[in-house]
Amino acid sequence: MTLRRTPLARRRVDLATVGPVTPPAPVGRRRFAELTGSWRAALRIARRESRRARRRTALVLAMIALPVLVLAFLAASYDMAELTPQERADRRLGAADAELRWVAETPVVQDESGDGWSSRDDSRSTAGRPTTAAEVTALLGPGSRATEIRAGNPVTVRGPRGDETLQGRVLDLADPLARSLVRFRSGRAPQQPGEVAVSPTALRRLDVRLGEAVATADGTRAYTVVGVVEFPDDLGPVVALHPAAVGRADPQTESRWLVDVPGAVDAATVSRLNDRGVVVAPRHLPASTTSSRAWLGDADTTDLSTGVLIAGLGLLEVVLLVGPAFAVGVRRRRRDLALVAVAGGDAAQLRRVVLADGVVLGVLGAAAGLLLGVGAAFAGRPLMEQYVFGVRFGGYRCWPTALIVLGGVAVLAGVLAALAPAWTAARQDVMAGLAGRRTPPRSRARALTLGLALVVGGAALAAFGATRTSSAVILTGLILGELGLVCCTPTLIGALARLGRVLPLAPRIALRDASRNRAAAAPAICAVMAAVASSVALGGYLASDGARDAHAYQPTLPTGHVLIYREEPGRQPEPTVAQVDAAARAQLGATAIAPVRAPLCPSADGPAGYCSVAPELPADRTCPWQPSDSLSATQRRQARADPRCRDRATDYFGHYVETLVDDGSALPLLTGVDATATSAAAAVLRAGGVVVTDPRYLHDGRVTVQVNEVRAGQNETTTTRHDLPGHALPPTVGRPRLLLSASAARQLGLDTVQAGWVLDTPAPPGQHRQDRFTNDLRAFGAFSLQVEQGAAPRDDSPLLLLLAAAAGLITVGAAGIATALAAAEGRAELSTLAAVGAAPAVRRLLAVCQAGVIAGLGSVLGIVAGLGTAAIVLFSANREYATAWPVREPYPYLVPWPALGVLVLVPVVAMLGAGLFTRARLPIERRLD
């Protein structure tokens, strides 16, 4: 029987029930989805890898988080130290409604905050006279209260370790307005002139308790400490004096009034008070003055660019330190990456897998650093307030904008550190990766060419910046040069590895491993090189600059001589020459003393008067150009060749001439001339003439003396000239001086006043001997001493050693990281060494050699690069100075030997540390086939 299959009936399709065909997604959206999915998978792989390699992850996180922690700490501390407008008003005014300052007797114009003011009619405004509380409240109307705050009164008292100078503030702490400015720690407010309240810092320095007395340095008064108060705007040694303890006759004392008014201090009130010469600082400021911080916009462009470049150097250092860890991670994952390529992953996806490691670790490092930094700023706030800023901070805040920037920079550092390993992973041989074989490193000529070009370009740019004295351009050149050396380092490592064939086993293996693992060794060597080069270059510049300053130094007196001035010239009684001489011989070892007198215009002794006495240079000896003029190259050459234009840029005194009155006794002590020149000059002074230390002022045996006088309350300058018999001293030390005889001063219509004394000592006295001398004369008031120490070179050794220590720390860290990573990577090779019978000490010796390769090669390259950079900068600056006018002192070429000594020892320390912390036992692994 034949079975016949019944054909199926054709199905009818109801077109009405079929939906429209979905068009394909746009190409851009499809690519975005593919990119998003690729990055999502890469981030998952990176997160898994960070958990699997915990030690390497912890190392990378520490290197990224540490600089973020430090910068976040500084940013949060700075933000808390920057007060908001409301906090500034509370600190300045306390509970008051406004602050008043009576600054003039004429109408004034002020800004909205009361910080700046000027005279309204452009006339010469005089200082405001001392006012009383009754006058202030009369200006404000009934129901107002006022209390005076006076600052700027230093108080010198006797302490357990000598005299202590405290910053005095005169205010009535019993008044609620003044009391709101301070925080009472203990005790009560001073109620009598003999009572004071001191800050905690002053209490510790004076080593006193409440109820005990402190005496002033001159012994004329004693105060009883009755309270301990803290001024939030000054945490240093401060003493609060009762208003009755200090007189109000001194017009120079800064005085302000805190006022409490029934209503508000509006614009009409401010305008009315300005008409009376009163400047007002109201509590409620207009919205235009309460804007948020805009310090970046107000900052100098040069300083900002310099800061950005320094931050770029720091970022480069972090990238170079973190790079070896990512390179080792890529090598240990080369089989996994090869499987991704076999599964269809292209080069871009392989790069994303490695870059995702940088993103994940950068985010984790940024989060950890920001949290720890902000937490440390909050926890260490009291210490920063007391010992760094010296003031109390505002509220707790952390500057979110800066933290976001820091977080972004941290992520950028992670990505940049993973960038080179990512490109290496994308170019690896898939078959070699699957088999676990190494891919031989290839030295690319392009990298070497680019590196040499960057080195030459960076050196040229740094030289150009030196001629323009632009730190930003110099730093840019240094960064380019260091990047060029980074590109050249792999080729250099390969060349050194070929030379290592003649070395013993351990150093030969160390060089071979460095050559094979250039992706890990080169960044570590470059990190050491960058740190050492920066330290050596800056150290060389500082050493040369210090020697240049010492050579250009112009003393004011012969070495060892001392000028003594009274800080209160009009105070009585005045010590005699015999009394000063006795104290100087006993405490300073003085061998000679002479009084120093100064001329004074009789009509210019008021606070607003002015008088100057100076010699006048003859017209035919005056330089036709001024140092402030902008000269062309031709004019600069003419000025340098003109004997009248011998001005130097390092001339501290310029055209200023110090004028004194002398009979010849102080002349040798002030100038240091020999006896023959002194006797001739003294004869001229006894004859009624004058003596100058600059022969250019002497013409035809006479000196033209010019007297400029501005009388109090006048704007016009009265000038008189007199030709007096003169004498010019041979070249002397010290500043330019004009010595008038007493009769010459009278002929010019001048009075004389005791200005001080000049001493001759065998050697410059130290601070302790100076303190004992001033204590002997304490009964006559306070004295200040000017001791000529001579042209001693500036001691930059602490700074140079600090720079070398920072570079050494980076060197040891980079060597330790690279050695540890190399040990972890070469574990199989160590097992092979053990299998063939190598001694256990070989592993330790190998670690020592690996650390020596990293630290030694990096230090040598850094020292050469640093010395070369310093030489380029100094040579370029000297070349520019060779045609400059006024003449500038050239830089000598000096080597910072203290820094170099430390940096030479650092590789030895790194090698000893590697040998100390490396286990000598070789690992033995058993393979199962």
Image: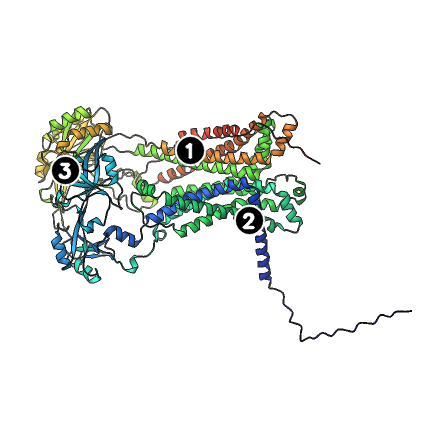
Q: Is residue 313 left or right of residue 437?
A: left
Residue 390 % position (x, y): 29, 42
Q: CA distance from mark 2 to mark 1?
A: 35 Å
Looking at the picture, which amino acid does disc 1 mark?
Answer: Ala
Residue plotted at (57% across, 38% down) = 518
**Which type of secondary structure does the marked residue at label 1 adopt?**
helix
Label of residue 568 in the image: 3
Marked residue nearer the N-terminal end (3 or 1) = 3
Task: Assign the C terminus to one quadrant of the image.
Answer: top right
The residue tagged 1 is 805
Q: Callout 1 environment at 10 Å: few (<14), some (14 to 19), or many (20+)? A: some
Residue plotted at (38% across, 36% down) = 541
The residue tagged 2 is 356
Residue plotted at (44% across, 42% down) = 67
Task: Assign the N terminus to one quadrant of the image.
Answer: bottom right
Q: CA distance from mark 3 to mark 1?
A: 47 Å
Q: Nearer the viewer, residue 894 or 86?
A: 86
Looking at the picture, which amino acid does disc 2 mark?
Answer: Ala
Q: CA distance from mark 3 to mark 2?
A: 72 Å
Residue 769 % position (x, y): 22, 27
Residue 675 visible, this orientation: no
Residue 498 % position (x, y): 60, 32
Residue 326 appears in which quarter of the rendering?
Answer: top right
